[in-house]
Amino acid sequence: MIKIQLQKVDIPPGGVHLALNVTLNEKQVRMVVDTGASRSVLDLHFFQELFPDAVLKQEESDSAGVGASGLSSFTSWIPSFFIESFEVKEYELALMDLSHVKASYNNLGEEAIYGVVGGDILERFEAMIDYSDFSLTLLD
């Protein structure tokens, strides 16, 4: 079990996102915890920079959500990645163009977001979010 401190991001007017750091291929990036997302998603272009030789599999249907619909989506297997210090092994990551998400955060003057940690990871590791101290607990 690990308890991860989340970063509270105020989204006007009156909204809140919870962000955390993820390390992929030794590169640390910021992602949003999204309990409404069925899958965890990383920006396609960023993924291709990190893993230029990775094999991409196009999804049969376009994805909806993360602020847009009709986005072409792909998947690719990675050996592991870290949510803070918590290692996730052998994971099929969903990939799509998240430039609209990055632009939204940029317009708010916030640090860039490269993806979302969604329901697949949250369920797999029996996640518990505590809003009293903005923490995420994951069980291995």
Image (cartoon, helix red, strand yellow):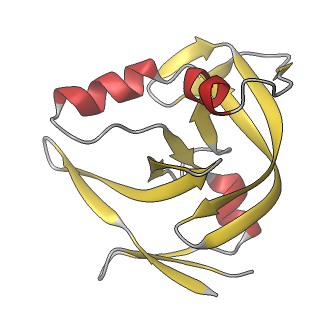
- In the picture shown, does residue 41 fall above or below 107? below
Q: Quadrant of residue 46?
A: top right
Question: Is residue 109 left or right of 102 when viewed as pictured?
Answer: left
Picture coordinates of residue 81, whole percent (x, y): 68, 56
Q: Residue at x 66, y 22 (%)?
A: 63
Q: Is residue 119 left or right of residue 109?
A: right
Residue at image point 61% right, 25% down: 49
- Horizontal side of 128 relative to 121 (left or right) equals left
In the image, taking residue 124 as reference, residue 13 lies left or right, namely left
Residue at horizontal 64 percent and vertical 45 percent from the top = 40
| 2 w.r.t. 64: above or below | below
Residue sitting at 37 percent across and 68 percent down?
6
x, y percentage for residue 99? 43, 19
- The picture places residue 134, in percent across and down from the top left corner, at 33, 74
Q: Position of residue 98 (x, y in %)?
A: 49, 24
Looking at the image, which is closer to me, 8 or 123?
8
Image quadrant assignment for residue 122: bottom right
